Image (cartoon, grey):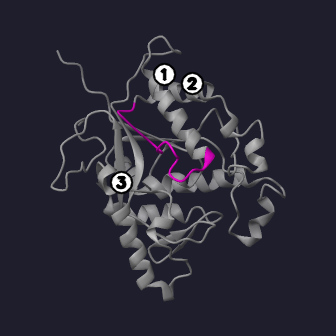
Amino acid sequence: MTPPAAPLALLLVHAHPDDEVINNGASMARYAAEGVHVTLVTCTLGEEGEVLVPELAHLAADREDRLGEHRMTEMADSMKALGVHDQRYLGGPGRYRDSGMMGTPPNERPDSFWRADVDEAAGHLAAIVREVRPQVLVTYDEIGGYGHPDHIQAHRVAMRAADLAADPAHGEGEAWEVAKVYWNAMPRSVVAAGLERMRAEGHELPFDAVEVDDLPFVVDDALVTTAVDATPWLDAKVRALRSYPTQVSTDDGFFALSNNVGQSIMSVEHYRLVRGDRGPAGADGREDDLFAGVR
């Protein structure tokens, strides 16, 4: 008798609260609604983030240093908006601290995520992989999308954890091999179209429009293997973004972080398959499902 297939599970690994919504919020809401077990692992509390709400400025790292605990409440609201019930902090809340940007004092702190031992951190994540048994893992590319040290470290830890979880000689519990690993991707053509739309409507928006080549996270369209259309869950993504008022501003289909660079709130989210077999593709040559070929 053929054993029953494992329940579908999706694991996402992100650096800070709010990263998950920007990159994957619509996908997360879609898969949660479809009955997939969605697990989000967040590596830090985002303690070094800038505070966009003036009345909460006292929470910042250079004042009361309580932004991390506040962002945990924002994260809980985000998960509620997306319908996700399994969110965890790597090693427990506060185990790894937000590293700030390269060359800044927070990046030098010994408790920063950037300074963490990769194998130790990956061991925490590998235990979650073996518990949840995801067919699909999503994280950042090797430069963390735009070079933030915590994003780069999250990439390293996620990729290492996938290896450790599949190795029967490592750790406790039954080994589990993730079938497909994806990196988040922002295709050049999609980002350029969003910026063009914002320029056309710029007189009504408070955000700055830039050129597509000014954005470090853009990738060539040819690298994008998968486009997940989660348009019915766009409202859930918008609600989740609005759960992070200290970090994100939203207006008329666009959002911006503290740099005030406007980006479209996307309901079709893009990915690059880097491990595993590509599933059936549509007319555009891309998968339309992270679980393509798995279910």
Q: Secondary structure at mark 1?
A: helix
- Seen from the viewer's position, the closer of residues 224 and 201 is 224
Amino acid at the residue labelled 3: His
Amino acid at the residue labelled 2: Gly
Confirm whether the magenta stretch covers residue 138. Answer: yes
Q: Position of residue 269 (x, y in %)?
A: 36, 56
* Residue with the mark numbered 2: 123
Q: Secondary structure at mark 3?
A: strand
Q: Is residue 198 above or below residue 111?
A: below
Look at discs 3 and 2 and give the one toward the viewer: 3
Which residue range is magenta in the image?
134-149
Q: Which mark is residue 164?
A: 1
**Residue 96 appears in view:** no
Residue at position x 33%, y 49% in the image: 223
Q: Is residue 144 above or below residue 263?
A: above
**Residue 166 appears in view:** yes
* Comes first in the chain, label 3 or label 1: 1
* Residue with the mark numbered 3: 270
Q: Quadrant of residue 38?
A: top left
